[in-house]
Amino acid sequence: MKKLTSIVVDDIPVALEMLCSDIEKYHPEIEIIGKAASVIQAAKLLQKKQPDILFLDIMLGDGTGFDILEIVPNLQSKIIFVTASDAFAIKAFKFAAIDYILKPYSNDDLTNAIEKAKKQIQPNKEQLDVLQEAINNPYSANQKISLHTSEKIIVVQLSEIIRCKSDNNYTTFYLENNQKILVSKTLKYFADMLKENGFLRVHQSHLINIKYIKEFIKSDGGYLMLKDKSNIPVSIRKRNEVIEALNNFN
């Protein structure tokens, strides 16, 4: 069997050697053909030889992993992003719908990432742009999200999402242009992700972009009328939260 080649990039020497050691010990099918501890080192290395898999730390001493991708725009390697346990970074990866390894990682995490890398299609430029924007501006509200469907990855503006509806382990996104996007993740996953972006879970099955609320009708148990003319029920335990959100809405 032909070995896969890899290059590992991390600016912390201990972390770099540990990842290399784990790859050599647990994944003999992968040959490490280079190591780098900075953007400059990595770029020089990748301009000479491109591995099958690039293990890429996001935050480096002299820049970010994105700087490397800009210097070597024709990179064909599958990328496994590696990041420290940082809340902003984790959120950024979720918005971009890109897989990553979180330090400290387990061998299972590493194995899963490698197996996905062998099969996966590279993240597209739009996904990488979403990730880069979120990493570079951690205190700014995310403007876009990547949605994985069974056929493709769609990057949409959060401002275009009217609402999301649960369908067991799937979520349907309803957009301003009447487009519907079915994603194989739960509503809770997106509710947790979008709660700081003007989205409110008003019912077990419904997540709403507050800016699209037209009226809150208090009769019949309480429901919302949205600007797209849809009516969305409000659960009893969410009623006060909805009223408070509308009172505070600018």
Image (tube, grey):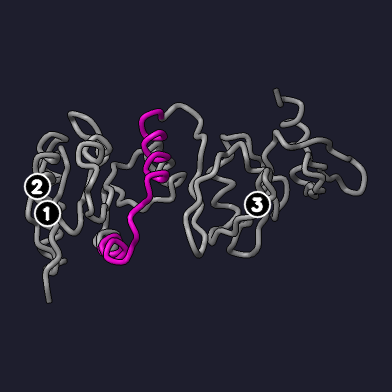
Magenta-colored span: 111-137
- What SS does tag 2 mark? strand
Task: Specify the amino acid type for callout 2.
Answer: Lys
Q: Is residue 130 magenta?
A: yes
User: Sequence-wise, which precedes: disc 2 or disc 3?
Assistant: 2
- Please give the residue where the numbered disc 3 appears in the rendered image: 179
Residue drawn at x 25%, y 59% is 110
Image: 39 above or below 167:
above
**Amino acid type, callout 1:** Cys
Distance between the alpha carbons at the discs numbered 2 and 1: 9 Å
Question: Disc 1 to disc 3, how far (Cα)?
Answer: 45 Å
Q: State left or right for residue 104 relative to residue 135.
A: left
- Residue 213 sits in which quadrant? top right
Pinpoint residue 95: horizontal percent, then vertical percent.
Answer: 46, 44
Return the residue at label 1: 20
Mark nearer the N terminus (2 vs 1)? 1
Toward which corner of the image does residue 107 lie, by quadrant?
A: bottom left
Q: Which residue is mark 2?
A: 35
- Residue 9 got which mark? none
The residue furthest front is 74
Q: Are marks 1 and 3 in contact (CB under 8 Å)?
A: no
In front: label 2 or label 1: 2
Give the structural element (helix, strand or loop) at label 1.
helix
**Left or right of 208 on screen, residue 15:** left
Q: Tell me which secondary structure the magenta stretch mostly adopts.
A: helix
Neighbour tally class for label 3: few under 14, some 14-19, many 20 plus, Cα within 10 Å: few
